[in-house]
Amino acid sequence: MAPYHVLRCCQRALNWVPVLFINLVVGWSYYAYVVELCVYTIPNNPERISYLVLFHIFLTMFIWSYWKTIWSRPAGASKAFSLPRAEKELFEREERAETQQEILKKVARNLPVYTRTAGGAVRYCDHCQIIKPDRCHHCSTCEMCVLKMDHHCPWVNNCVGFSNYKYFVLFLAYASLYCAVICATVIKYFIKFWTKQLPDTHAKFHILFLFFVAALFFISILSLFSYHLWLVGKNRTTIEAFRAPVFTNGQDKNGFSLGFSRNAAEVFGDQAKYWMLPVFSSLGDGHSFVTRLVHIDPEQANSVLQQNGKSSADGKAEPCVLGNDIQHTADDGKENNDGGQIASVTMECEP
């Protein structure tokens, strides 16, 4: 066991190397821009001050969103998705996969779970021993099931999912703007140094290298940012973009898409004043999602999860039944961008 723990500690330490690299690059860019460009190279104060103010605004937002992405703990599934004691004992004793699936299906009927495996089975995590909520996946690096998991990002040494996806998108946005500001303000002096219109000083290397680094990072980050904006507009995760979610009625790559505005609101919230700030404003609780086929009332779903053991007010978990085999009625007043109907689900709790 000792060698395993030593290896795990070494792996966790190595996981911070990309984060350290990013911080070293940002630290050097700060020195090169503020000291070498603004202090030693720019000749007049108005230009110097305006550059410094603009630079520090985008640097602050970039660092804020970056570290919020890093330190936001991935959201895991609530206890409501664990098997009850009796069913868990039956599941562990049973050796036949078909019978195990019957047990899982029986439990899943009481949960807001509508996605399945490619073979139509209930999605169950053997490591965490839970029925996976919709859009939840197990991360082998974080060793947990992450709600609305997008991917595990080595550059932030964290899983990007429901708890920090907004921060991650803002991190990409502000990183792009940070690099764009550097390129736009440095290019004039980059050309002067390159054409020998300025004397060769110790600032020359920093400014030339700063422009190249900022331009390369801008191109790479902007492409990734554009891709994630597309994912937000489609209401997909990176995992779902490569492997479409499977519902009880089959595979549907647009199963969670509700139109651009509602898709964006799921990530950024419905209050515009919070959209550009790295503060949590995403809608929902990460356990249940509105789909093109099934509409779940967020308040009722949250109440069900609380009473099933998520976080009841009095600290006691009481059983509550959420019907998953309910008659769906089409709501003619709501249409999505694919022309599909949204059905409403009535959930009733039994004492």
Image (spheres, helix red, strand yellow):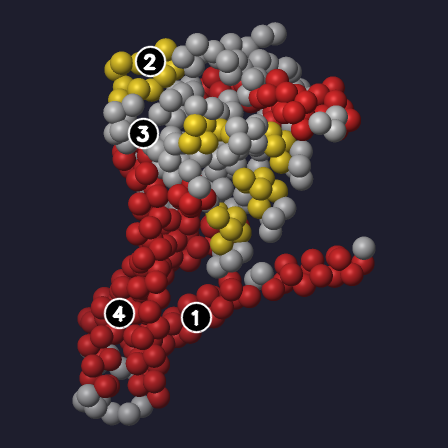
Inter-mark Cα distance, 4 to 1: 15 Å
The residue nearer to you, when weighing 8 against 95, is: 95
The residues tagged by marks 2 and 4 sit, at their Cα atoms, a distance apart of 53 Å
Can you say which quadrant of the picture contains the N terminus?
bottom right
Where is mark 4, residue-wise?
A: 183
Label 3 vs label 2: CA separation? 15 Å
Residue identifier under label 1: 25
Would you call the spot at circle 2 few (<14 residues within 10 Å), some (14-19), or many (20 or more)?
some
Helix, strand or loop under label 3 = loop
Tell me where residue 269 appears, x and y as whole percent: 35, 35
Contact between labelled residues 1 and 4, with CB atoms less than 8 Å apart: no
> CA separation, marks 2 and 1?
54 Å
The residue at 30%/20% (across/down) is 341
Residue corresponding to mark 2: 330
Q: Is residue 83 visible?
A: no
Residue type at numbered disc 3: Leu
**Residue at horizontal 48%, vertical 48%?**
151
Mark 2 residue element: strand
Spot the residue most to the right.
1
Q: Which residue is mark 3?
A: 258
Q: Quadrant of the C terminus?
A: top right
Relative to residue 61, is residue 213 depicted above or below?
below
At label 2, the amino acid type is: Ala
| Front of the two marks 2 and 1 | 2
Labels 3 and 1: the sequence-earlier one: 1
Depth-wise, is mark 3 or mark 2 nearer the camera?
A: 2
In the image, residue 82 lies at what x, y percent? Answer: 65, 27
